[in-house]
Image (spheres, rainbow, N blue to C red):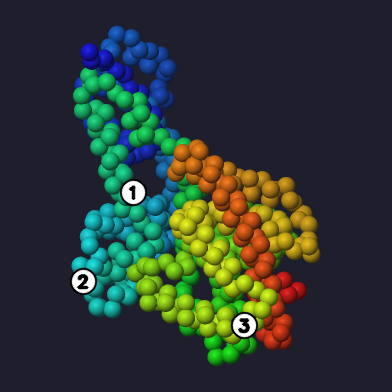
Amino acid sequence: MNKNTKIIIITSDEDIIQRLISNEVKNTQIINATENLHYLSKFKSNNDNQINKRVLESSTINEERSIKVRKKWIDTVCVICGDQGIGYNYNILTCGSCKTFFRRNFNEDVDKLQCLTGEEQCSVSHEIRRKCQKCRLKRCFSIGMKPNVVKNNNRKTKDIDQLFTNENNIIDSKIISDTLFTRLSVEDWITIQNIQSSFEFFCNFPLEENSALMDLSDRTSAIISWSYVGSGTVMRFINFFRHMKQFEELDNDDRFILTKYNLFPIYLTSKGYYYKRVSCCHSIQFWQKEDENNRRFISLCDTSSYNVNTCDDLIKCLIELTERDPTIISLLSIILMFSPGISMNENEPLLKDSLSIYRIQCYFTKLLWNYLLDKLDEIQAHKYFIQLFTLILRIQLGAKELRQFFQHQFSITNTKDKVAPLMQTILHFY
């Protein structure tokens, strides 16, 4: 027996709104909530076949929100081509041109596309009029644009269409819930997307350039060149945190303390994102060469008091647990940054405003927890969170041991004064 069903959908998702408004179904009513409340009463009673589609905002509210949106994205940059960003599209902050390009081309087989120059290293800057389709699409994928987001949007559209295919069908409430709602709030998702894109932008390390800077001719040259390569990496993390409002609003002394004592564990954590990651930019051959360089570097150092496998084992655990998820790694990095005492250095000064830092840490810990709940079921999220906490303890100890290892190398070669200034601070020379 068919049962007539009323559906009330309230949403701010413009894609859903447009699909609902354009769907022509009999007995459908669009309600403007800004009009008098008594106007709504006449829709309450007699017509059970009626479907209330959406409580629409007034033009004034829409205009105000439009102004806020324009202001929000005015200073953003597309991570694909460098043009002005318009928002997050397919998981990444992009301009309108790159958004359209990816939507039209994500189904293409990259390997079958022809490179304009044949070198597969074409610039895709917005200033270039004719861009190589192959190199542009490869960059979209390497930066993190996700075709499954396009597919999910298409599936969402089909689900919405299905809701109104037959007004007499019994509607499964789970379909509506799964289609329109997630555990994370809109504000949470915006924050996560901001963090993820910022992390991928600032922490996109120039690995080939770094490799070329390493001088492995002798022990002294090796560790000094490592300090300058490491300094560039640390500077990228500093720029990442300087773009966080919560970090910038801290007391200057507190910012310095957190940077000096907490960045080295984060430096180690980042390897779980990019280490041995095969992409269009970094081939298997490149990482094989990196392994050879790492072995050469270790052979030049004094490893009598350090287990060289400790760092590799920790990175493998990071990769296995996080699956290189940029959201998890970026949120984990932020939590570590706002964790006083993570360095295990007894000389670390007290913070002036430890309460504010504690609140920031709690906020991002909760955000990570909500993200895990959205990604996993609750039992899996609990287990994952425990594993992550255990991993943080290992990172804490591993970072301390690695820092002591480098302190020892510079001490026995008497080269502390030749170390990159930023690394002198991070390694706690002074």
* 127 relative to 331 in the view: left or right: left
In the rendered image, the quadrant that contains the C terminus is: bottom right
Label drawn at residue 311:
none
Give the mark nearest the N terminus, 1 or 3.
1
Q: Secondary structure at mark 2?
A: loop
Q: Position of residue 102 (x, y in %)?
A: 29, 57
* 285 relative to 343 in the view: left or right: left
Give the mark nearest the N terminus, 2 or 1.
2
Going 52% across and 56% down the picture, which residue do you hit? 329
Q: Around disc 2, counting alpha carbons within 10 Å, would you say few (fewer than 14), some (14 to 19), or many (20 or more)? A: few
Above or below, 242 relative to 408: above
Q: Nearer the viewer, residue 155 or 314?
A: 314
Q: Around disc 3, counting alpha carbons within 10 Å, would you say few (fewer than 14), some (14 to 19), or many (20 or more)? A: some
Q: Position of residue 339 (x, y in %)?
A: 67, 54
3D distance between C-alphas at marks 3 and 2: 46 Å
When asked about the image quadrant of residue 156, the answer is: top left
User: Is any atom of residue 126 visible in this view?
Assistant: no
Going 24% across and 33% down the picture, which residue do you hit? 161
Label drawn at residue 301:
3
Which residue is disc 2 drawn over?
Answer: 114
Going 24% across and 27% down the picture, which residue do you hit? 164
